[in-house]
């Protein structure tokens, strides 16, 4: 693992508020990580948590999920937090499926819900910076 925990953050539209709430609750810890996100998720995160530096890639449906997948297979992501909307169909479902596949294949930390994301972050960064 790199010096800083490298986290990729993605949320489907119906879960973006949950993601922003989660990030806000952990802002001090996340500020100590290297963050990358798909386009709209990243924008939402930076709006809600101005102290966070987030590298924004393309929007998910325009290839952002594939960009994150590429980074995972290149060994550049330690953890993926992906708040999926299980109740809607997505035009780029094949990209989502491919991303889940490489995340599992690469054996990175992979949180699909808030409880797991909390546990990953709190166990790896127990102390928030004062
Ligand atoms: O569609 C997404 C994940 O599949 C997320 O993309 P955005 O963050 O650009 O909305």
Image (tube, rainbow, N blue to C red):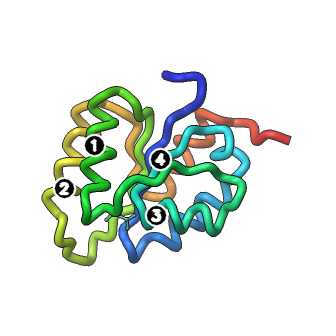
Q: Residue 56 carries which label?
A: none
Q: Which of 118 and 97 is in front in this view?
A: 97
Mark closer to the chain start, 3 or 2: 3
Reading the chain from its start, which is encountered first: label 3 or label 1?
3
Taking the image in four quarters, ligand 1 sits in the one at bottom left
The disc, 4 or 1, on the residue closer to the chain's N-terminal end is 4
Distance in Å between CA atoms under marks 2 and 1? 9 Å
Query: Is ligand 1 closer than 8 angstroms to the Cβ of mark 2?
Result: yes
Q: Which of marks 4 and 2 is nearer the N terminus?
A: 4
Question: Looking at the image, which residue is at 19% across and 55% down?
Answer: 95
Q: Residue at x 50, y 48 (%)?
A: 55
Q: Label 4 vs label 2: CA separation?
A: 17 Å
In this rendering, position of residue 69 left or right of residue 124: left
Q: Distance between the residues labelled 3 and 2?
A: 16 Å
Residue contact at pointers 2 and 1, CB within 8 angstroms = yes
Tell me which numbered mark, 4 or 3, is placed earlier along the sequence.
4
Do the residues bearing badges 4 and 3 touch, measured as CB atoms within 8 Å? Answer: no
- Residue tagged 2: 95
Q: Marks 4/1: CA distance?
A: 12 Å
Q: Is mark 1 on a helix, strand or loop?
A: helix
Q: Is mark 3 within 8 Å of ligand 1?
A: yes
Query: From this viewpoint, is residue 62 visible?
Result: yes
């Amino acid at each position: 693992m790199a010096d800083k925990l490298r986290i990729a953050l993605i949320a489907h539209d119906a879960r973006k508020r949950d993601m922003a709430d989660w990030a806000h609750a952990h802002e001090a810890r996340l500020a100590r990580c290297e963050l990358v996100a798909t386009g709209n998720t990243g924008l939402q995160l930076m709006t809600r948590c101005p102290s966070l530096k987030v590298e924004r890639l393309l929007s998910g449906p325009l290839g952002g999920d594939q960009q994150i997948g590429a980074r995972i297979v290149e060994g550049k992501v330690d953890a993926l937090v992906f708040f999926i909307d299980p109740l809607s169909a997505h035009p780029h479902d094949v990209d989502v499926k491919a991303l889940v596949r490489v995340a599992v294949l690469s054996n990175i930390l992979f949180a699909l819900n808030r409880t797991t994301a909390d546990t990953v972050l709190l166990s790896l960064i127990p102390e928030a910076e004062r």
